Amino acid sequence: MDWNTIFSVTVESLINPTTIVYALAAIGLNVHFGYTGLLNFGQSAFLGVAAYGLAMSVATYGLPFFVGILVGLAGAVVLALLLGVPTLRLRADYLAIVTIAAAEIVRLLFRSVSLSKWTGGSDGLQRFSDDFYSRNPFTTGVNLWLFSFDRRELWVMVVGWTLVLIASLVVFLAMRSPWGRVIKAIREDEDAVRSLGKNVFSYKMQSLVLGGVLGSLGGFVFALSRAAVQPDTFGTEFTFYMYAIVILGGAARVLGPILGAALFWVLLNFINALLPAMISDGLIPRWVMDANQAGAVGYILVGAILILLLIFRPQGILGDKREVMLDAR
Amino acid sequence: MSIFLQQVFNTLSSASVYALLAVGVTLVFGLTRIVNFAHGDLLTVGSYVLFLVAPAGAIWFLAGFAAAMVAVAVLAVVLERLLFRRTLVAPIRGFLVSLGLIQIIESGLSYFFTAGPRTVHPFIDRVWTVGGVDMPADRVVVIVGTAAVFLALTFYLERTKAGLMIRAVAIDAETAGLMGGPVTRTIAGVFALGGMLAGAGGAFGALLAPVTPFLGYALILKGFAVALIGGLGNVRGAMLGAVVLAALETVVITFGLSTWVSFFGFTLMIVLLIVRPRGLLRGVEAEI
């Protein structure tokens, strides 16, 4: 068994582009779910709209890269407003169902055949990232002990981790401010906040926009690191992993999503590298599982970990039990 | 006219499966406030039990149908005992637990049965034509069978003491408990009931269309759309919602927009929630 490869895949997941994407998405989701108590299950749509905003501006309309980024950000804000107006007055459980449906609607629009002239249909879009990579200051990749990244990955990672840092700083400052106190108070008792004369709907909307925009940064990194966008990568499974990450790291904690994302991918990639290696070495007999089934086992473990966390430690690793809205109320 | 009747027939057969799914969803939500997204996968488990018991179809279908109902009911009670009972204090935790369960059940099914689609052998392999309407016998069985299941369910909920207890816990669990009613057992019972309906729905669904391990997730979105349209927590509302959604889908498909089916369904759900937050029939209030 090639322990070197297994360990290098695992250790690289600490900091690789996928982890960045999920960390950014989870930071945004943490604003919604952890701090405000909004059960937004359409976070994948924010990433999708941002990624498609960028990809369509550049690949379909030939606009400059930075205009594409602005279009993507504007798309995330508009989506937050569109999603918020009908749903923010709903109970938490209704909100979850409606946002899932809304994210599905967005995905169906992206993959629709009638719109494929602009969106590329189910194949998605490519060739929008050249401008980004042409600014790459790295001339070679690195190959350091277990870490090996090519120069494109390095560039994505430098930009990505800078974004993670900025996003975390924004959340840290926002949640220390008077605005953040109102947001957390809404999570604890909406009626009490309303009785103090605050416009709860407006605050929730601001939180939805902020979290959506932070998440949309993940959408940009996602699109650029793959140099492609495809509608089916923005399914509900995406949002589900983000929730697993927020809960694992600890909701309503600034560093929770980052820790969660790193741990989640280290764990999942370790299992996904270890099981096939053990099968090909005959350490796991074929009648237990073959290579196809090994993938399914990875997903079963993800589900099991999430359930165990929710039952036995809903505050995750860093969280505070009194501050998690998963408790009795 | 016969074209219209044909569409009515098609609507009813897909409405049957939606209703069996959504009534279970709505019952469990009504008593526990848990949004159980794994309920769609209970239906798929029912289909796979049918494949195991009745690979040859025909008369074996009846045994498979019964086995699916029993097996899924047992599974639902086990899940309630192990997981959902611990999340009753915070139903949102139950919702997140159900999302983890989706991963486990769907990946588990693909582990044991591969990811490819499966079809069951027909129960009655012929097509009846009445007044220009082509009626595959299996679809008739599904419609009639569902009607029978719902007659029995309505009788159970409205004419028996256990049914009375279910309705009492749905209205106010605390008071029902103070009156000496077995609240915990009733909740477990409702999970079993929802499981039986899902098992029946899975067996019927397998007669209508091929089944894959990952069908449950697409189904549960429709199941909740149906339950919300009808009024979440309201059993008759779920039946009505199933007919409404199935009719909408039939119309959309008739206009040649079959790739837009879920788009229209979800949009209807969201628009209806804005206009009528309680759904068509009085369900749980959607707004805070």
Image: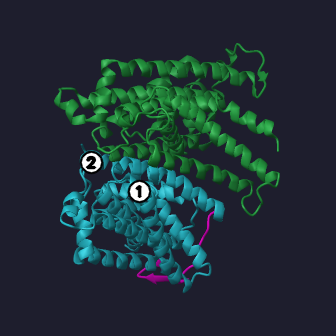
Q: Which residue is mark 2?
A: B286
> Looking at numbered disc 2 in the image, what kind of residue is underneath it?
Ala
Q: Position of residue B272 (x, y in %)?
A: 29, 49
Direction from residue B125 to residue A320 in the image, left or right: left
Q: Which element is circle 2 on?
A: loop
Q: Residue at x 38, y 53 (%)?
A: B35
Direction from residue A180 to residue A122 in the image, left or right: right
Direction from residue A192 to residue B156 in the image, left or right: right
Q: Is residue A49 visible?
A: no
In the depicted view, which residue is nearer to us: B105 or A128? B105
**Which chain does tag 2 point to?**
B
**Which chain does tag 1 point to?**
B
Q: Position of residue B77 (x, y in %)?
A: 43, 66
In the depicted view, which residue is nearer to us: B28 or A229? B28
- Vertical relation: A143 (above or below) B245: above
Q: Which residue is mark 1?
A: B84
| Colour representing chain A | green
Residue B242: mark in rendering: none
Which image quarter: residue A170? top left
Question: Which of the colour schemes (rainbow, by chain, secondary structure, one colour) is used?
Answer: by chain
Q: Which element is circle 1 on?
A: helix
Quote the CA–CA distance across marks 1 and 2.
Answer: 22 Å
Q: Which callout, 1 or 2, points at the residue further toward the start of the chain?
A: 1
Direction from residue A243 to residue B27 in the image, left or right: left
Q: Badge 2 local density, few (<14 within 10 Å), some, or many (20+)?
A: many
Instruction: Give the extent of the magenta segment.
Output: B116-136
In the depicted view, which residue is nearer to us: B177 or A129? B177
In the depicted view, which residue is nearer to us: A247 or B106? A247
